[in-house]
Image (tube, rainbow, N blue to C red):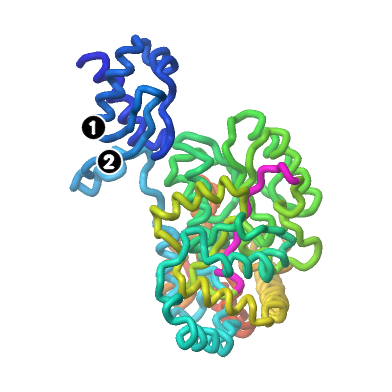
Amino acid sequence: MMQFQRVADEIRRAIEQGRWHVGEALPSERKTAEEFGVSRSTVRRAWEELQSLGYVHWTAASAPIVVNIPLRPVPINPSLIGKDLPYRPSSTFLSDLMSAASSSARYNFEIGMPDPDLLPIHELQEIVRDLLSQHVREVFSYSPTQGIARVRQALSEEYLSRRGVAADPDNILITSGSLQGLDYVTSLLSRAGDYIVTESPTFAGALQIFASHGAQVLAVPMDEEGIRVEPLAQALAQHPVRMIYVQTFFHNPTSTVMSLARRQAVLALSQKYQVPIVEDDAYGFLATANPQPLYALAPGDAPVIYLNTLSKLLAPGLRVGMVVAPRDIIQYLSQRKQLGDLHTGTVTQLLVEGWLRSGNVTQHIARAQTIYASRMRIASELIRRRGLFLFGHPTGGFYLFVQLPKHINAYALHDYAAQRDVLFAPGEAFGIGDRYRGWIRLCVSALGTTAIQNGMARFFRMLDTFSP
Ligand SMILES: Cc1ncc(COP(=O)(O)O)c(C=O)c1O
C-alpha cells in the first residue's frame, strides 16, 4: 500500500469511529505529517483521496472539513454486529422499561412516571379543544428546530423560573424528552474513549447514552448528601474528564437530594478543573427547602449545562424536555437536532404552553409534592420494617433503591415477581459492571397508598417463597 493510502485509510477509520464530527476540521497539514511521520505532500495526497471518497471537503486554504461519515455495510450475521463498531450496543434496559409502562401488572413499581391520576385531564382537554378550533394550521405545521419561541418563553417564565433558573428563551432548546438533550450534549462534549464522571449509582438511561458514545465512565460513590467530594476530586485530578453528569434533586434511583454544601463543593471542583457540569433536574420540581440547582448557584462563567423535562411533572408521553445553556452551545445542539428529528412535536409543545399558562401549575406542583412525599414515607417505612437495606433516607422523589438479601438474584426475582403481578427494576443497570447486582429500584410515584401497601406485602411474601 502506498504511504498516502495508509494515511488516508487511518484517517478514514478515525472519522468512522467518531473522532471528528461533520463540520469539524481535521488537524493541520504539519500536525498530520508529524503524527504519521510522512511528508506534507503525502498528507495532501491522503486528503485528496479522502475528498474523492466523499469524507471531507478540502480547499487548499486550510485543513479539510469532515462532510460525511458514510455508513459501512453491517454484517448480516447478528453475532457479528457490534464487533466492528467503536462500542458494543448497550443494554435494552430503557426499551424494556417502556414495555413495562404498558404492562397490566397490578403492582407496577418498575416504570418511573407520574401518577396518571394527577393528570389535569379537563384542563388538557380544554387546551386541545382550543388548539384545534383556533390554531389548527399552526398545530399541524412544522415549527422551529430550537422550539417554538412563545413556548420557550412560557418555559422560561412559568417553569424554569420556579427552579431559580433565569433563562432567556434564546438560551433554551426544546428537546424530545430530556434524554435527547443528554444525548446531544454528550455528543458535543465527549468522544469515544473520553472520560465522563457520574454518581454511582446513576440514571440507567444516562449510562446507556454514555456507552453509546464510547465514553469511559468514572462512577463516583454517593452518600446521603450526594456525590462524594474526595473521590470526585481524585477522579478530576487523575483523568482528563470531559463532563460531570449529576442529578441534584431526588436523584434516580436513590431519591437523594444533594446538600447545599455539596453543591457548592461540586461547583468549586468543576471550576478548578474547568470541567463542565451537566445537571439533570428531572425531579427538581419536587424540591421545597433549599431548592437551587447548580445552574442557579453557579457564578456567571461557570460551565453548567442544565437539563429538565415535563415527563415527571406532567406526562412523559408528551416528550417535551429542555436544555438551558449558553447560546453557542444551544446553536450546536440545534444543529444536531435538525438531523435527529427536526423539531419536537408542534402539538405537544403548544399543549405544554397552554398548560404552563393556565394558572394551575403552582397548585399542581404542590399536590405532586405532598402526594409523592407521603408515598415515599409509607414505602420506605415498610422496607425498613422488613429489615431490607435502603439507600439513604429519602424524604421525597419517585424511587427507593433497595439491597436484596445476599442469596437473591435480582433478575431471577424480577421474572418470578412479574408472573405474580409485581414489577420492579433490577439495580444492575444503574451502575458500572455488576456493582448493583443485588439491588433493585422500586418506583412508588404511580401507585396509591393501598396499592403500595398491598404490593409491598406481596413482594415481601415473594422474598420468602422465592428460591433462586
Ligand atoms: C434523571 C432522569 N433524567 C432524564 C429522564 C428522561 O426523561 P425524559 O422522559 O424527559 O426523556 C429520566 C427518566 O426516567 C430520569 O430519571
Residue 127 vs residue 157: left or right?
Answer: left
Of residues 135 and 243, which is closer to you in this image? 135
Which quadrant would residue 87 be assigned to in this image?
Answer: top left
Disc 1 target residue? 53
Which quadrant would residue 249 be assigned to in this image?
Answer: bottom right
Which circle marks residue 302 in the picture?
Answer: none
Residue 256 appears at what percent x and percent y? 69, 59
Residue 313 appears at what percent x and percent y? 61, 72
Instruction: Label 1, secondary structure: give it.
Output: loop
Residue 63 vs residue 369: left or right?
Answer: left
Amino acid type, callout 2: Pro
Residue 365 vs residue 130: left or right?
Answer: right
Residue 315 appears at what percent x and percent y? 54, 74
What's drawn in magenta, residue-wise? 300-313
At 42% across and 55% down in the image, what residue appears?
Answer: 338
Residue 80 vs residue 107: left or right?
Answer: left
Residue 120 appears at what percent x and percent y? 59, 84
Amino acid type, callout 1: Leu
Count all numbered tags in the image, as a single digit. 2
Of residues 60 and 383, which is closer to you in this image? 60
Answer few, some or many: residues within 10 Å of disc 1's Cα (few below 14, many 20 plus, some between 14 and 19): few
Which circle marks residue 70 in the picture?
Answer: 2
Kindly indicate whether the residue at mark 2 contacts the one at mark 1 (C-beta within 8 angstroms).
Answer: yes
- Residue 87 belongs to magenta span: no
Q: Quadrant of the C terminus?
A: bottom left
